[in-house]
Amino acid sequence: MNLAAIDVGTNTTLLLVVSVGDAGEIAVLAERAEITRLGRGIGGDGRLGAEGIARTLAALRGFADVARDHGAPIAAIGTEALRRAPNAADFLGPARAALGTEIEVIDGAREAALTFRAVTASFPELRTGGLTVVDIGGGSTEIVVAADARVEFETSLPLGSVRLTERFIHRDPPDAAEVDALVRAVDAALAPVPFPPGPAPLVGVAGTVTSLAAMAQGLASYDPARVHGYRLARADLGRQIDRLRGATQAERERFAGLDPRRADVILAGALILEGLARAAGAAEVLVSDRGIRWGLIYEILESRPGA
């Protein structure tokens, strides 16, 4: 059986197509990621812009072709931009026509749950003891705090790389006052989160985190085998932030490991991740490139009779 999962995010639209064997083993047939910026302007009135809608629909049409080539039925979900947008119907109707199926717009709790499911499947050794999982998106950040694979706290906060860039970063390169204001906003939003006491693993998911892992390794091209499971030390994260703070967008676009289309929002995402590591008291971030699209695949498989 083949399956396709699509994640329509604020910044990025992603496709995963897998083959599932008789014993439940999963093999990746295709993966795609397009930075479509559906949620550009999310820090304002939340309305979806015509250009973002057009870019995302174009990506979905291409994704649908890939899924059809593999004979894979599609399950699709939408996150923060579609949760907020008063004109979401302007996108969802044409998207249904492009995919042949509805996009399910999920709330922050379900987004966090899917991310957590993907992480615990990817790293089964983390099912004992304390654990924090964070998913930094373009419009929001989902946080799950767990003990022995049991979720004890989850939240979705309005901390996203696109949202905070639009709110705080107006100069190129940003000045100290802009960065300081962004950091204070992150720290204030994270203050109520009950992170596990003592040292506990911190797992980071999604494009900001995987990009920083690729940058720390100086990867000429993205290699999921070198990114998934990479341990990004706080000191290395700090060095990447220093590089990003001192560079113009044009300079950041040439950084090894960074997709140039992410260059304008990566600093805000990195500062969110640094704030999370600081608040959690984590010396490193375990990087996962298996996000909510993987959680959706696992959910579908586990719902089958006899799973």
Image (spheres, rainbow, N blue to C red):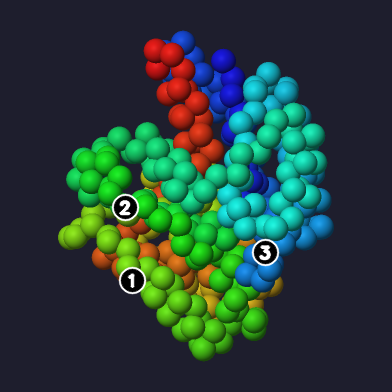
**Number of numbered tags placed on the structure image:** 3
Which of discs 1 and 3 lies nearer the camera? The answer is 3
Q: What is the CA distance from the residue labelled 1 to the residue labelled 3?
A: 25 Å
CA neighbours of label 1 inside 10 A, class few (<14), some (14 to 19), many (20+): few
Q: What amino acid is found at the position of numbered circle 2 in the picture?
A: Phe
Of the two numbered discs 1 and 3 on the same chain, state the one appearing first in sequence: 3
Q: Which residue is mark 2?
A: 153
Q: What is the CA distance from the residue labelled 3 to the residue labelled 2?
A: 27 Å
CA neighbours of label 2 inside 10 A, class few (<14), some (14 to 19), many (20+): some
Instruction: Name the residue nearer the viewer: 86 or 307.
Output: 86
**Secondary element at tag 1:** loop
Residue at the location (30% across, 35% down)? 124
| Image mark for residue 46 | 3
Of the two numbered discs 2 and 1 on the same chain, state the one appearing first in sequence: 2
Would you say residue 225 is visible in this rendering?
no
Residue at the location (43% across, 14% down)? 305
In the rendered image, residue 66, in percent from the top left (x then y), is placed at: 71, 29
Residue at the location (45% across, 57% down)? 156
| Image mark for residue 228 | none
- The part of the image, by quadrant, that contains residue 32 is top right
In the rendered image, residue 268, in percent from the top left (x then y), is placed at: 53, 70
Residue at the location (23% across, 46% down)? 147
Q: Which residue is mark 1?
A: 191
Residue 86 drawn above or below residue 15: below
- The part of the image, by quadrant, that contains residue 74 is top right
